Amino acid sequence: MSPRWRSATEILFTPERVALLRRAFQAAVTDPGFIAEAERQRVQMEPVTAERVHAILDAAYAMPADVVKAANEALDITGTSDN
């Protein structure tokens, strides 16, 4: 039986590690000292939860191909514009 090779993301981002990183991020962005320092430096923060990021990405990836193509062309992120 051949060994099963795992990708770097499978190794680095195990479910346990992802959960730990999410908790750490949430703790950091709600920490009063962190918030006070951000305000002192005039850094505007609007942190969102991982669940909200997933919802946004799921909606983006569910877009029909023609909508994605039109958005790419409108934003000129395809790199094909002569402008």
Image: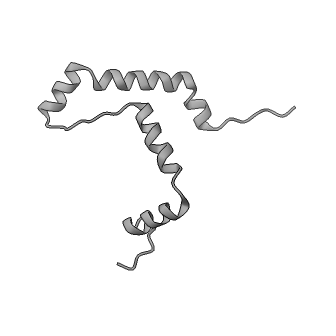
Q: Residue at x 14, y 35 (%)?
A: 41
Q: Is residue 12 left or right of residue 77?
A: right
Measured from the top left, where is residue 33 in percent x and y?
20, 20
Q: Nearer the viewer, residue 73 or 17?
A: 73
Is 56 situated above or below 77? above
Position of the C terminus by quadrant: bottom left
Q: How many marks?
A: 0
Q: Nearer the viewer, residue 81 or 69?
A: 69
Q: Is residue 4 left or right of residue 78?
A: right
Q: Residue at x 44, y 64 (%)?
A: 72
Q: Residue at x 56, y 25 (%)?
A: 15
Q: How is the image coloured?
A: one colour
Measured from the top left, where is residue 6 in percent x and y?
68, 35
The quarter holding residue 46 reads: top left
Is 2 situated above or below 82? above
Q: Residue at x 19, y 31 (%)?
A: 38
Measured from the top left, where is residue 79 in percent x and y?
44, 70
Q: Residue furthest bottom?
A: 82
Q: Is residue 35 left or right of residue 11?
A: left
Position of the N terminus by quadrant: top right
